[in-house]
Image (cartoon, helix red, strand yellow):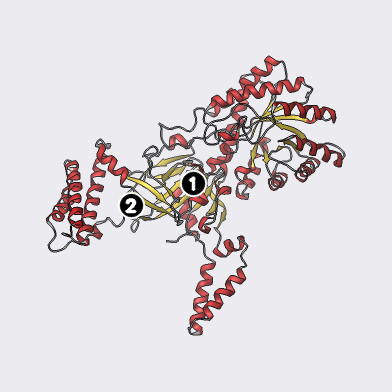
Amino acid sequence: MDYGINMWGLNNFFIDNDKVAINYGNEPTLIEIVKEIESKGYEGPILLRFPHLIKKQINTLYSNFNRAIKEFKYEGEFKAVFPLKVNQFPSFVEPLSKITSKYNYGLEAGSKAELILAMTYNNIDSPITVNGFKDKEMIRLCFIAGKMGYDITVTIEGLNELDSIIEVAKEFGKNLVHIGIRIRLHSGGSGLWAKSGGIESKFGLSATEIIEATERLKKENIIDKLRMIHFHIGSQINDIAPVKKALREAGNIYADLIKLGAHNLKAINLGGGLAIEYSQNQEIRDKNYSINEFANDVVFLLKEVTTKKQVPMPNIFTESGRFIAATSAVLITPIIELFSSEYTSKALKLKETNPPLIDELNDLYKNINENNYIEYFHDALDHLESLLTLFDLGYIDLIDRSNAEVLVHLTIKKAVIFASHKGFKHNELKKINDRIQEKYLANFSIFQSLPDFWGLGQRFPVMPITHLNKTPTRSATIWDITCDSDGEIPFSKQNPLYLHDVELDKEEYYLGFFLIGAYQEILGMRHNLFTYPNEANIEFDDDGNYKITELYSTQSINDILIDLDYDIDEIHRKLKTLIDNQDLKEEEKKELLGKLLIHLNDTVYLKK
């Protein structure tokens, strides 16, 4: 089973015999990298970052737009910025800055802190765009960036921001920034994040406000600073049709603004929303277009509108963060327990003399084969119903009931294996298999590492990174290690996940969660005080050999408590006092305190 890797994998990973391998360089397997990291003393979940996949996505974006510009004889340029809100971690931003220097690829900031990052890590010849609501202090920071030599565009979200720009320009003696206007389109997006676009969206100026802003710019004699209009119809846009509608609307606004006197208006910023494919199911796709089609539509439609309106073709900006970042990170987590493990032959406690139905169940379990598995499956279910009735009436005891449950479960597992060999042609067995799921306890927190699954129901590709030469037969529910009932990925008939029947005391089993490089880390929450996992950057040298360039350990319990503003010295003192008050020998007290302090310097994730 390939777990849909050809749908969502973008040829970044492939299955090499029984393992997931990286389709780059010397093609190492994920388990090979994980084992090397574990050998250095890092246990628990590991977030692997692949900077080469960031570079690949940026190159894909630019090459498709530049191809379309050449193909359609478009007279504007393509430019792009990365929205820092998608991933602000230094282990992502610093490699991004190195990768993007040759692309003229910039950064987008939506807060003062993000703007400082953009001013620090943006390549000096690359653009910076500033979105979101701003006060005068944030606008002053933009002017400082302009004075530092950056090509910076401040997108106004309301008329008050325009007043602030005018005031700050007078403080600095001249206007050091370009001005953009966020336009509130009538067109909306599609998908989970559609509400971030359309006429009821949070951001943008109405047609009336756009005209008023233009008049103010003329009055202040800075209309020449209006260089960009900006729109955003949603994140992860799964349908190309709303994009086309928005482009026509934005193109006409652009053309009319030029005719109203904004002669230096040179760019249309499409915002983000370029979708990626998360689905592992051929029948349920997350988008209905390719990057090739997206680039063609944008270039063709903007050329069509501006040619008709007889205005210059604008430069095209995008702020697609998910498309750039999502593919670059993979979470690997070990499975530490299977919650149907009590249903093994070791759990049987057969007596010298058993109830006849128990003996019959034992015979079914021992003699089931590929020719009789349907009949024996039915007989096992029938026997279980009879035995449960006998238990309720007091004719058999708890040991007999336990033996019945174990034998029926083991018989069903055998029947499922035989059925899987024949493609699950027996619907009843498939339904039983889907209903009786294996519970795989994974050493991670969904709230920390996959918050969009918990909050929005966003599915991510999940697959084992080993055992791939064997047919997975167990319908799987994944539990995380938080004490929260929402900390699970339940089995879904619409998006079924089947995993392997493994014996964890004999073999290790790891799951990979893919396409999690966008938003998940920065949105992750410390539910139960589980912090970020271990992290590693995996790069390749000129010979194609991988190397671990950065390795970050997850936080200790001490560090987590300090981050929450606890006085760690006070915690240590109180714990010591409680131990000192116990009726113990001094040596025992010292030993107990020493063990406690060791645990405080340990991590929160579980160990083998």
Q: Residue furthest right?
A: 173
Residue on which the image places disc 1: 454
Question: Mark 1 falls on what kind of element?
Answer: helix
Residue on which the image places disc 2: 502
Q: CA distance from mark 1 to mark 2?
A: 27 Å
Q: What numbered label is drawn on residue 562?
A: none
User: Can residue 430 be seen here?
Assistant: yes
| Quadrant, the C terminus | bottom left
Q: Is residue 309 above or below residue 295?
A: above
Q: Residue furthest bottom?
A: 585
Residue under the image location 23 percent in, 44 percent down = 415
Residue 500 in picture, x, y percent from top left: 34, 47
Q: Amino acid at mark 1?
A: Trp
Pick whichever, 70 or 333, lies toward us. 333
Q: Amino acid at mark 2?
A: Val
Disc nearer the start of the sequence (1/2): 1
Residue 227 in picture, x, y percent from top left: 75, 29
